[in-house]
Image (cartoon, coloured by chain):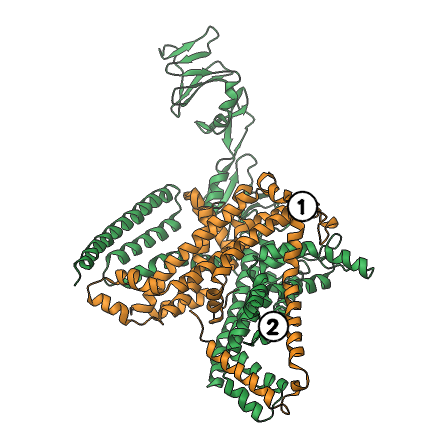
Amino acid sequence: MRPSRSTAKSSQHTVNTRSSGSRFRTPRAHIPRWLGRLFRHFLIWLAIAYALLPVLWIFSASVNPSSSLSTQTFLPSRITWDHYRSLFSNPEYPFFTWLLNTLKVSGITAIGTVLICSLGAYSFSRFRFRGRRVGLMAMLLVQMFPQMLAMVALFLLLKSIGDVVPALGLNTHLGLIMVYLGGAMGFNIWFMKGYFDTIPRSLEESALVDGATPFQAYIRIMLPLVRPIMAVVLIIQFMTSYSEYILASILLRGTEKLTLSVGLRFFTEQAFNRRWGPFAAGAIVGGVIVLILFLPVQRLVVSGLTQGAVKE
Amino acid sequence: MDPRFTCTMRSQSVLGLTFKIVSLGIIDSIGIWGAVSLAFQSSYTLLTLLILGVGTLNVVILSKRAYPLRYLLPGLVFLAAMVVYPLLNTFYVSFTNLQTGNLLSKDTVLHLLDERYYLPEDSSVFDYSAFSDDADALALALTASDGKVWIYETEELREADRSDPALTFDDAGTVQGIEGYEIVEGIDRYQILSRLEALAIPRGDQYLRLSGINEFKAYRKQYTYLAETDQLLDRQTGLLYAPIDGKFTAEDGTQIEPGYQIWIGGENYSRVFGNAAIRRDFVRVFVWTILWSLFSVLFSFSLGLGLALLLNDRALRFRFFYRTLLLVPYVMPVFISALVWRGMFDVNFGIINRSFSDWFGITVPWLTHPTWAKATLVFINVWLSFPYMMLISLGALQSIPNQLYEAARVDGAGMWKRFHRITLPLLMISLAPLLIGSFAFAFNNFTLIWLVTSGRPAVFGAATPAGATDILISWTYRIAFQGGVGNQLGLASAISVLIFFMVGTISAIGFRLTRQLEEVYK
């Protein structure tokens, strides 16, 4: 899963060092190298300040004894964890219920997506059957259209499913998970198929000669080899569902059922000014969870993204 | 061959068979159970779909030829049910009048109207006593004003016979007991009130219904449906109602609520384009959606590319560390950063305006003035998406062959020239499709708009709920679920369909560009 960038990088590096020798061709040569390098670091630190300022600000707000937006200062007068404690106890703000709901919904969606899509990708990658090309084209077409545009129809669909099977209808997590799973299919099957295609067939073929069924070859040979892409899809899908707002806001109603995105917006809808402190604590907890999940697999996800994945 | 290996293989295929049988069993039992409950609710469209679906599943699981499909099946089921069907249904709904007041099917509405009653002038009044047995079944004894007593038991009404041994009468001739039942009196009566209210006991062409806590009255059905002429007769007034635009309407214009869903052809579309007021909203929202996506991509790509150029030097210290820090805005869930920014940009209390008034003595209407609100939104979106742009630019920069730079250097090309003659054109080849993808994403970035401004500030005189910062998708959302005039699901679906076509066009351009640019590269 690592992109082959090291060769390109090292040769570029050689070019840079060599360029200092031919000084009459590079205008930058008049500026001392250390100053240029310092300037580069300075610019990057400026960007980092821009990137991190809101995060530092919200962290400072979360430990500030004042819970109001209007009296917030960058450095809190003293540090308190009261706002974090209030996440457990505020009945208007059942933060942990929302967080658990979100973890449940996005966790199940992510695992389901990996299982189901790896099966589908295996089929598209390894079998030749009638309708394969049409199927691939159809997947490509379907994934171009954002599922949320069908929000009215999804609302009506879950409403009528709920009339028959209340556990899958409106205001249920299972219903929302089904919707998310559907939306994740088209893109991820294509994405995974691309990776499956790069695994040589000879490995499974020898297993098939030894009498394994294709399904055994999938489980025993393929899955261990494609672990990186499975991790990427798992994390990206988890993050996507974790942040999803519009469908969750249409399909979930009761306060106890909300996911974090809908819940936080609901909580801050009124009296945002007064609720800033507790909100800040919730924002930090909600954000840190994703950061912790993301950082260890950063390289994998980044290389997955830059390999032509259009996903934000 | 290793004997252990064969052994596990065999047990695996037994496992496979078990799996097949179990999954078939689960699918079919769910199917049968669903079919039965759907049949009871007489929703035959869904029933047909269910039978077709379960049939296909069985064929795919049992047939050898459909073997590859078994792997695709789980994905296809969700894709079909949760993406393809809703997409098609969006098209269908966009051609109907589905909205508050017209949410039900005609059959359901007729069914509801059939349960409306009126009190005729010659109605008679009944006192009653209520009884219930161990299984909570209800029985009633109804005494008419002429002294006749009627017994309602096991959903049947019969005239009480004084010699019936199952009944106990008191001196006044009212029933005090029914064998097998306990009388329900006093406060207990309130507990069965809702069940009593649901009763409509047929007697001839009349229906006995609860009309007060202590009495029943004889009602008549209000409406008769005349199937041949598709009209509704109000038996109380004698008025005839004809179905017009999804509502039963009398000649004098009175309508019967609720209305029902009907096919209205392209009317929703002609409202968007034909109705001057709605068209004005549409054009305004559309233009802003395009500008919003364009500026977001342009600025975030410029910033991202700039940072990528800075970071794209192997000799740079802390490179990986810098990149990780710069990724934070990308990793933070959008709903969190959007709300944080909303707090910071708050016009009255936000840190930005408080600092501005401290330092310069001015405040800026960040989120309350239409133009400022738009600029603020773009600013926030740049913050959210520049890390992504930086990542894809870094990837693309590293794929540019170095000989090109060396050759340019030999030819005496300066830094700027190398950038805009080599780097930029080559970057565009690999990044153009991704940038178009980002454009399409911004085009539908509901979450950010909704959490920061919710489409506000409001625009006075707008025909639909369209604020100054509403993009097409948030406008659709408001029409569908937030409108002051109720939920106009049909109109919202029509706009969804329009967005479908726009996104489709954008993606098609993306595909073409990929191919063309690749040919250029060759």
Q: CA distance from mark 1 to mark 2?
A: 36 Å
Where B152 sits versus B501, above or below?
above
Q: Which residue lies at the image location 46% right of the left edge and 11% below the top edge?
A: B174
A147 lies left or right of A65: left
Indicate the position of residue B133 as horizontal and vertical percent values.
39, 19
Give the chain letter at badge 1.
Answer: A
The one nearer the camera, B262 or A103, is A103
Q: Residue furthest right?
A: B361
Where A268 sits versus B295, above or below?
above
Quadrant into which the N terminus of chain B falls: bottom left
Amino acid tagged 2 = Leu
Q: Which chain is green?
A: B
Q: For residue B307, which numbered disc appears in the image? A: 2
On the question of residue B489 being in view, the answer is no
Give the chain letter at badge 2.
Answer: B
| Chain A, hue in figure | orange
B100 lies left or right of B229: right
For disc 1, the marked residue is A275
Amino acid tagged 1 = Arg
Q: Residues within 10 Å of mark 1 (few under 14, many from 20)?
A: some
Q: Are marks 1 and 2 in contact (CB under 8 Å)?
A: no
Indicate the position of residue B400 as horizontal and vertical percent values.
51, 81
